[in-house]
Image (cartoon, rainbow, N blue to C red):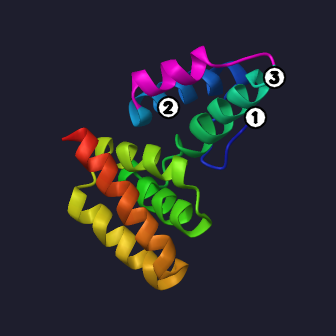
Amino acid sequence: MTRPDGDGFSDGERYDQGMAVRREVLGDAHVDRAVAGTTEFTADFQDFITRTAWGDVWSRPGLDRRSRSVAVLSTLIALGHHEEFAMHCRAALRNGLTVDEIREVILQSAIYAGVPAANTAFRIAREVFDAEA
């Protein structure tokens, strides 16, 4: 496979790259729990997200991880994916966003995704920040 950025990777290489990036962004503890919880039913999905989301998209050179975190947080707020928002709020901190910057992302999302969505995001972010403190 050749990516638009010119790098060609085998599925195994994409998996290895994806697992490395996944661990860097989400943390070993989170990834270890996800891997430990993998069953025959979920194995293909875990492989898919590791290769595709983490090995392909998160590994692309076009955006840095801070920018990717902003895009992910905004999208998760808009779509109401609260569990994923909490996980990626922690990841955004790991990727170098500050609490103030995350607050600005949520405020910006209120305009385009709606006040109720932002209200929920503020509650979840506060819980994440309290737990991280």
Residue assigned mark 2: 22
User: Which percent across, then down, holds residue 109?
Assistant: 45, 75
Whole-number angstrom distance, CA of label 1 to CA of label 2? 21 Å
Label total for image = 3
Q: Amino acid at mark 3?
A: Phe
Q: Earlier in the sequence, mark 1 or mark 3?
A: 1
Whole-number angstrom distance, CA of label 1 to CA of label 3? 27 Å
- Left or right: where does residue 64 sit relative to residue 39? left
User: Which residue sits furthest bottom?
Assistant: 111
Closer to viewer: mark 3 or mark 2:
3
Image quadrant in which the N terminus is located:
top right
Assign a secondary structure to mark 1. loop
Q: Earlier in the sequence, mark 3 or mark 2?
A: 2
Assign a secondary structure to mark 2. helix
- Look at the picture and state if 27 lies above or below 112: above
- Look at the picture and state if 16 lies above or below 48: above
| Residue drawn at point x = 64 percent, y = 27 percent | 14
Q: Amino acid at mark 2?
A: Arg
User: Which residue sits furthest right?
Assistant: 41
Determine crowd level at label 2: few under 14, some 14-19, many 20+ residues with C-alpha closer than 10 A: many
**Res. 98 image quadrant:** bottom left
Residue assigned mark 3: 41
Image quadrant in which the C terminus is located:
top left
Whole-number angstrom distance, CA of label 3 to CA of label 2? 21 Å
Q: Which residues are magenta?
A: 27-40
- Left or right: where does residue 48 sit relative to residue 112? right
| Residue drawn at point x = 70 percent, y = 26 percent | 47
Q: Nearer the viewer, residue 101 or 83?
A: 83
**Which numbered tag is attached to residue 1?**
1
Q: Amino acid at mark 1?
A: Met
